[in-house]
Image (cartoon, helix red, strand yellow):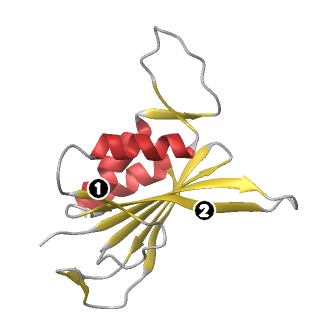
Amino acid sequence: MGTRALTFVYDSYKTKSDKIVSEPIINMYRQYDGYPTGHGAELAEFLNGGRLVNGLIHTKTSQELVFNGMPCLAAQLVTNFKDGAGQFYLYPVTSKDCGQDYEYHIYNIDGEFKIIVMNCGFNMFGLTQDETYEEIFKGTLAEFTEFCKEKEVA
């Protein structure tokens, strides 16, 4: 049985009234290994491997991984995880019930990644067995990395 997960990446912008709005731009579904010590740890490793920037400077010597905004990060996220048929799929950002056990929400707040992890309850064969939907983590990338490591020990 797979531990399913959804990963949402959000892009934020300011309205004319200076209100900050965050909208999901991608919903990546993972068929199995979606728990924090699996997908969460791999997600943390991917995010820690790059740097969020606003604009690119092209140099031939730089091998550094950069994310030129959240849409660029979303595209690289898919490229990083998807390596053949199965396991990862893209769903509309409006899809909320895909039989997921966990959800990962990635935001850019003032140039820093913020991650929220939701426990969606126990699912079996895509059918929700309980109505749990609780936040089990909210914090920075560094805190998220530690959260995923702690879950492994627990």
Tags 1 and 2 in contact by the CB under 8 Å rule? no
Q: Residue at x 64, y 29 (%)?
A: 55
Q: Position of residue 8 (x, y in %)?
A: 46, 60
Query: Which quarter shows the C terminus?
Result: bottom left
Q: Tell me the residue that label 1 is attached to.
A: 39
**Vertical position of residue 108 compared to residue 30: above or below:** above
Identity of the residue furthest to the left in this view: 1
Q: Work out how far the residue at label 1 is from the one at label 2, CA to CA, in angstroms.
A: 22 Å
Q: Is residue 103 left or right of residue 13?
A: left
- Residue at (16%, 69%) from the top-left corner? 2
* Residue 99 coordinates in the image, percent (x, y): 29, 78
Q: Which kind of residue does numbered mark 1 sit on?
A: His
Type of amino acid at the residue the image marks with label 2: Glu
Provide residue 119's location: percent of width, then percent of height. Answer: 37, 75
Q: Which residue is mark 2?
A: 23
Instruction: Bin the neighbour count of mark 2 within 10 Å (Cα to Cα): few under 14, some 14-19, many 20 and up.
Output: few
Q: For the point 44% across and 54% down, which residue is it?
A: 144
Residue at screen point 65% across, 33% down: 54
Instruction: Kindly state the secondary structure of the residue where label 2 is placed.
Output: strand
Q: Earlier in the sequence, mark 1 or mark 2?
A: 2
- In which quadrant is the N terminus drawn? bottom left
